Image: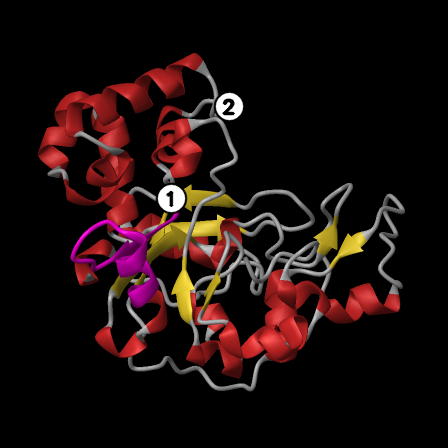
Amino acid sequence: HAFTPYFSAYAHFDSVKEAYGSMGKEINFIELGLSADTHYADMIAENRGYQFLTCSDSHSPWPYRIGREFTRIKMKEPSFRELKKALEEKGEKRITLNVGLDPREGKYHLTACNACYAKFSLGQAEKLSWRCPKCKGSIKRGVRDRIEMLSDGREEHPEFRPPYMHSVPLAEIIQIALDVQGINTVIVQSAWSDFVERFGNEIKVLVDAPIEELSEANPRIAQKINAFRLGWVHYIAGGGGNYGKPLICNSKEEFEKKGKELKEGENDFSGQKTLGEF
């Protein structure tokens, strides 16, 4: 992945080609990670020449983590040869959709202290020599600030770029709907299993299943899924290693009111479409 502030290419280099030297010309695609989406990645000029993959962190043992992000690719058969063609031949538009978290939900979206998670602007962090005045912890530069440092100021996408759909994991929606503290609680995991078993998989629950059928399983959860589909979601942005928090509203009026309450800058709009627009 390209953007997280510890081990990624853009954490330590100003370009992918700089990171890979003479082999830079062999790079055909980059993986966006949980910290960036198409909107952010294409703000850097060189990225407009790459294909984008969105892949969740599959090292986690929890099933609800594995499908958080995925890439839809058109292939004649599920083979490495077909995958290689999809990644190398942009003109064929074989990558048809990227799906992933809103970058604000990522652990390193904003510049923040990695101990107490206090958030800072890039200018503040530089003046503080990257040391938190509250707890003396280390301030970690956020992905948003890093991308703005490298951006050429143009917001455009190449002709071959597919749509990007923001997603909220089903387990998180269930946790919010049932108003419980932990995502790993028995009540959340039981509801998650019930929905997945009934409808086939998590993506069908989030995107395809009729709301009426979801309501038969659990009306409170169905209401939040419907709100997610309509785009009534704000975020308290993450930073410093702490995940951001989605705020799913039950009506357009509540969504607009909550938007006015949230601090400007921490929850900036990044071009999310509602599911109805896809």
Q: Give left or right: position of 245 versus 74.
A: right
Residue 182's mark?
2
Identify the image quadrant of residue 116.
top right
Looking at the picture, does residue 228 appear above or below residue 120? above
> Judging from the image, what secondary structure is the residue with disc 1 in?
loop
For marks 2 and 1, the one nearer the N-term is 1
Q: Quadrant of the C terminus?
A: bottom left
Location of mark 1 (residue)? 168
Q: Quadrant of the N terminus?
A: bottom right
- Foreground pick, 41 / 77: 77
At label 2, counting other C-alpha atoms closer than 10 Å, the crowd grade (few under 14, some 14-19, many 20 or more) is some
- Foreground pick, 261 / 108: 108
Residue 81 percent across, percent down from the top left: 29, 59
Q: Residue furthest front?
A: 81
> Judging from the image, what secondary structure is the residue with disc 2 in?
loop
Identify the image quadrant of residue 206.
top left
Is residue 223 located in the magenta-colored stretch of the structure?
Answer: no
Residue stretch rendered in magenta on the structure: 69-86
